[in-house]
Amino acid sequence: MSGLFSLLSSTSSALNAQSEAINVTGNNIANVNNPNYSRETVDFEPLTSVQTADGLQSTGMTVSVTQTRDSILDAMVRQEDSLTAGFNAQQNVLQQAQASLNESITNSSTSAATSGTDTTTVTGLSAAIDDFFNSFESLAASPSDPTQAASVVQQAGVLTDRFSQVDQNLAQVQDAATSSVAGNITTANGLLQQVAQLNGQIGSLETNSPGSAVQLRDQREGDLETLAGLMPISVTESTNGEDQVTTTDTSGQPVSLISNGTVTNSLSFSGGVISAGTTALGLSSGTMAGTLAAGTSVQDLRTSLDTLAGQIVTAVNSAYNPGGGGANFFAASGTTAATIAVDPSLTASTLQAGTGAPGDNSIALAVAAVANQTFSTAGGDLIDGTISQSYGNTVAGVGQALATVTTQATDQANVQTIVNNERSSESGVSIDEEMSNLVTYQRAYQASSEVFQVVDSMLSDLMTDLGSIT
C-alpha cells in the first residue's frame, strides 16, 4: 500500500512539472515578437529517492526554468546598437544641414574645385552669388541705364538675404541638435534609475535562487540596450546577479554609472560637453555622440560661410571703392553670413558704375571681375580659389560628409542585423520548436494524469476492500 502512495506522490509531482513546462512554453509563444525577451527552457530533475521497506523509491520530480541568454552576444548587440545609433544621428543632422543650404549637392569634393562650376538650384546661395556678379556685368554693358542699377541693388539684397537665411537655417539645425542631446540626457538618466532599481529587485529575488528572475532580467537587458543606443556602455554582472555599468571619460578611462542598486553618477550636458557627475565623458558612439559630432560639422559649415561672406565684402568694397575714400558697396562692419549687408547709403541712384564721365564702366567691370578672381590664403586672403570654387568646396564637403556617414550607417546596419540574428538563433523563440515541445509536454501530462487516475482508483478499491473486511 505504501508503494501506491509513493507512486501517487511521484505522479502528482510529475503532473506539476509537466504543467509548469506547458506554462513556460506558452509564455515563450506569447513573447515570440518581443525583442527584449529571451527564450526560457525547462530542465526536469528527479527529487531525492528514499529507502523504504519495499526498496529505494522515487519521491517524484521537479523543474527549473532558465534563460537561454548569452552575455557575450548581449554585449555585442549593445555595442552594435550604439554604433548604428551614432551613425544614424549624424546622418539625420547632416541631412538637415544639406537641406538648409538649398543646393543640389554632389558627392564629389573635387568637381566644383577643379571646374569652377556647380549643379546648384536656382534658389540657392550659389545662384544668388552668380546673379549678383552677373548684374554688374549687365551694368558694365549699360552703365547709364537706371534699370540695370536698380537690378544691381536688388541682386545685392537677394545675396545678403540668402546668406542670412542659410545661416539662420543652420543655426536652427544646431539648436535642434542641442535640444535633442538635452532630451537624450533626460532619457538616459531615467534608464539609469530603472536599471538600478531592477538590479535591486533581481539581487533580492535571486539571493537563494540565482538566475531565477528571468522576466526582470529581460526588462533590464532591454533598458541597457536602449541606453547603449544613446551612449557606449560596458556591463559586468556581479555574483548576486546585479549589473555594474560604466562608460569612458575623455582619456578612455572607465567612469561608473551604476553599481548594483545605486546610480553612482548621473549625466549632465553643458557647453557641448556631456558629463557623468563631474567627469567629462568621451563618447565614441551612440545617438548623443553622433549628434554632437554632426553639430560640430554644422558649425564648421557656418564658419566657412562666414569666411566666404567676409571675402566677398572685402573684395567687392576694394573694387567698388579702390581708394577707400568714397562710399562702400557693402557695410564694412558686416563680414559674416549673419551680418553681411548693403551699405546704408547705397541706392540705385547713388550706385557708381565708373569714376569718370557718363558712360564710364570701370567700377562695374572691376566688381564683375571679382567673380573670376583667384584668392589665396597664403597671400593674406580669406579663401583659396575663386568665390564659386570656395563655396563649391564648402557645399561639396557637406555632400561628401553625408555620403560617407550614409555608407557607414548602411554598413553598420548590416553588421547589426548579423549580430541580432546570431543572438536570435541562440535566445530567440522558434514557433516550430515551441509547438513541438507543447505537444510533448501535453502528452506527458496526459500520461501522468492517467497514471494518477489508475493509482487513485486502485487506492479507492483497496480502501473499500479493507473496509469490508473490518
Image (tube, helix red, strand yellow):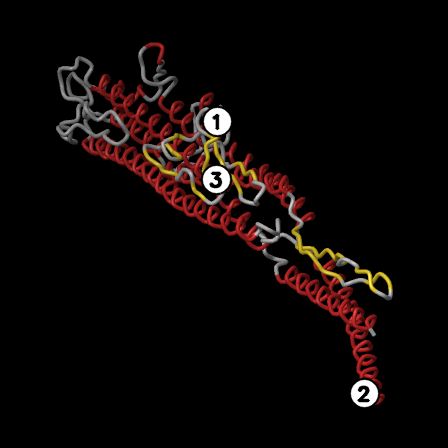
Q: Which residue is mark 1?
A: 253
Using the rendered view, name the quadrant where residue 164 is placed: top left
Q: CA distance from mark 3 to mark 1?
A: 17 Å
Q: Say what secondary structure mark 2 lies in.
A: helix
Marker disc for residue 259: 3
Point out the tag, 3 or 1, that comes first from the N-terminus: 1
Residue 44, image x, y percentages: 75, 57
**Label 2: few (<14), some or many (≥20) within 10 Å?**
few
Amino acid found under the numbered disc labelled 2: Gly
Neighbours of disc 1 within 10 Å: few (<14), some (14-19), many (20+): few
Foreground: 378 or 326? 378
Q: State the residue position of label 2.
A: 467
User: Position of 309 compared to 298: left or right?
Assistant: left
Residue positioned 57% across, 39% down in the render: 80
Secondary structure under the numbered disc 1 in the rendered image: loop
Residue drawn at 59 percent across, 56 percent down: 34
User: Given the image, on which type of amino acid does mark 3 rest?
Assistant: Ser
- In front: label 3 or label 1: 3
In this view, the mark in front (3 or 2): 2
- Toward the viewer: 21 or 396? 21
